[in-house]
């Protein structure tokens, strides 16, 4: 008995390991396409469903996708309404692997398929070329079906130790088998932490005749609920929108199973009409059983999505009613970058996209720092003399807090990218991380420059070295040029710049350099003419630091 359970556990672990390697290989080969697909999810609800389906097909895990969607909602990358369609699509996408297993795994000699796939995949993955990800996919494919082979053979004698025919001795036997199966499906999926893995296990033990087809159908329904566990766990540390997204996923599956269980036999009949074979024809070794279970898995999710999809807005309002907004005291603690690790199938490609949102937020903070300085410079001469020093001091304090926050973001994101670099990534993703590291380093340097500029302004007011209105009027267009550059940068960060944007960035860089030279020349002339040396030196230093901001903008614009 112990040997039997160990063989089953080993086969299941090999299957899950194969799914993990397959997922990593797919993500590396389809990383850029997945990124474009995720950009598509901000469209209508049908686009969201398609996005959820595609991304889950690539990650091979609805758990990974749903947890990432919760994370995206938490940081504002997706609205709650947009996330609903994507979460619906994840449930359909996760059925793809079950189809592959049901069609190939129980109809073809697995040893003749799995071992060559492992051998060829290993050789391809060891070669240093652009298609190593294909080798990883084949390697994972082979391990998946080899694990399925051991799982299937390991469960062959399970019926000798467990007599499931005794279920239903009282009342409707088939109905009781379904209800017990649903409960067992929840437990098994929670333990395995993979609905696809649990479906493969259900197919294997049903194929061997260990459990009845009705009980297997109930377990498939239970797996739909068990797979929702990780989304609420990921939302615990998130904001109210993250918790709402998790609730969307949980309620969608629970309500779906609630209506499906009473009409499960009509659903099974519908599947029987669509697919060939009779799953009730034999207790064991019936190739129709895995195929029909995969069909049930997909049919239920498609119908459930079709029922919910017309009422996305109403569903969103229901979720908001259950989880209303909470009042906050407005205080914020130190920065934390919480990225997602979804157990069996980590998803570095999706986490990098999540990090790009944080980098965009960093650029937004820089824009707000610079805008604050620009506003203060504009209103300097209009303010009362007694209020100028206080306003300049407040400006420095505000910008110092933001500069320290940017430092915290830099530390957290650098640590995250360092951890990503230790994972298996495609060459394109490795180059992407290298670019992003340079971007956040430049952004942090920009925050230092913004704070230094505010200190120079505060110094000019405190030491009574105020710029004359004429000098300020010459400085403001120069300040506005850099402000325009920052706005251009913030709007396109994380996207490949177009030719027009590259040309505009080059124009701005050239204009800033030329204006800086003119302003320096005017400052030196004023010193030669007997002007206040301290004032002019502060003016020249401010011009230099503002120009450094423009240089950083230009460097980032070239990185894309």
Image (cartoon, rainbow, N blue to C red):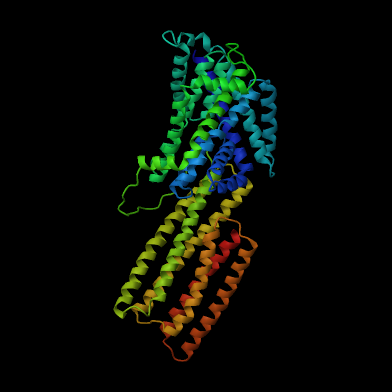
Across and down, in percent, residue 270 comes to 57, 22
Across and down, in percent, residue 313 comes to 45, 43
Across and down, in percent, residue 90 comes to 53, 36
Image quarter of residue 48:
top right
Q: Residue at x 41, y 50 (%)?
A: 336
In front: 300, or 112? 300
**Residue closest to the far bottom:** 529
Q: Is residue 163 above or below residue 405?
A: above
In front: 446, or 70? 70
Q: How many marks?
A: 0
Can you see residue 338?
no
Q: Residue at x 58, y 23 (%)?
A: 271
Residue 230 located left or right of residue 303: left
Q: Residue at x 52, y 49 (%)?
A: 417
**Residue closest to the far front:** 310
Residue 244 located left or right of residue 422: left
Q: Quadrant of the C terminus?
A: bottom right
Residue 289 located left or right of residue 255: right
Across and down, in percent, residue 476 comes to 47, 77
Can you see residue 322?
yes
In front: 250, or 425? 250
């Amino acid at each position: 008995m112990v040997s039997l359970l160990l063989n089953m556990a080993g086969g299941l672990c090999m299957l899950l390991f194969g799914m993990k390697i397959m997922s990593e290989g797919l993500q590396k080969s389809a990383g850029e396409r997945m990124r474009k697909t995720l950009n598509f999810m901000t469209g209508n609800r049908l686009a969201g469903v398609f996005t959820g389906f595609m991304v889950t097909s690539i990650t091979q895990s609805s758990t990974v996708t749903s947890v990432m969607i919760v994370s995206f909602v938490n940081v504002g990358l997706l609205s709650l309404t947009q996330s609903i369609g994507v979460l619906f699509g994840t449930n359909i996408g996760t059925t793809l692997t079950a189809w592959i297993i049901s069609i190939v795994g129980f109809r073809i000699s697995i040893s003749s398929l799995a071992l060559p796939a492992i051998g060829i995949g290993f050789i391809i993955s060891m070669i240093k070329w652009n298609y190593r990800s294909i080798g990883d996919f084949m390697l994972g494919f082979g391990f998946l079906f080899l694990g399925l082979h051991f799982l299937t053979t390991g469960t062959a004698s399970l019926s000798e130790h467990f007599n499931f025919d005794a279920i239903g001795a009282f009342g409707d036997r088939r109905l009781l088998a379904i209800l017990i199966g649903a409960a067992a499906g929840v437990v098994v999926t929670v333990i395995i932490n993979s609905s696809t893995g649990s479906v493969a296990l259900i197919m294997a033990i049903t194929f061997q005749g260990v459990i009845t087809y009705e009980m297997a159908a109930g377990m498939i329904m239970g797996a739909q609920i068990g797979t929702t566990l990780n989304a609420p766990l990921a939302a615990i540390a998130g904001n109210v929108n993250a918790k709402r997204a998790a609730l969307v996923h949980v309620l969608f599956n629970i309500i779906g199973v609630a209506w499906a269980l009473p009409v499960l036999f009509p659903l099974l009949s519908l599947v029987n009409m669509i697919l060939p074979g009779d799953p009730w024809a034999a207790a064991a070794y019936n190739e129709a059983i895995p195929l029909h279970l995969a069909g049930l898995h997909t049919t239920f999710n498609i119908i459930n999505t079709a029922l919910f999809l017309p009422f996305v807005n109403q569903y969103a309002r229901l979720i908001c009613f259950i989880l209303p907004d909470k009042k906050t005291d407005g205080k914020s603690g130190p920065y934390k970058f919480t990225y997602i690790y979804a157990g069996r199938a980590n998803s570095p490609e999706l986490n990098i996209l999540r990090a790009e949102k944080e980098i965009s937020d960093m650029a937004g903070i820089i824009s707000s720092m610079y805008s604050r300085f620009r506003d203060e410079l504009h209103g300097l001469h209009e303010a009362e003399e007694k209020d100028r020093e206080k306003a300049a001091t407040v400006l420095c304090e505000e910008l110092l807090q933001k500069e320290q926050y940017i430092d915290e973001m830099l530390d957290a994101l650098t640590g995250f990218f360092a951890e990503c670099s230790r994972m298996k990534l495609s060459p394109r993703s490795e180059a992407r991380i290298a670019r992003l590291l340079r971007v956040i380093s430049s952004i942090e340097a920009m925050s230092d420059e913004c704070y230094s500029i505010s200190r120079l302004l505060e110094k000019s007011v405190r030491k009574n070295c105020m710029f004359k209105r004429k000098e300020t009027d010459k400085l403001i267009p120069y300040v506005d040029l850099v402000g325009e550059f920052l706005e251009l940068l913030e709007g396109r960060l994380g996207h490949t710049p177009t030719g027009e944007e590259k040309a505009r960035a080059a124009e701005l860089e050239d204009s800033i350099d030329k204006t800086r030279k003119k302003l320096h020349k005017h400052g030196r002339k004023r010193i030669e003419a007997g002007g206040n040396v301290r004032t002019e030196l502060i003016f020249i230093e401010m011009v230099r630091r503002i120009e450094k901001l423009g240089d950083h903008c230009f460097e980032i614009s070239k990185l894309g």
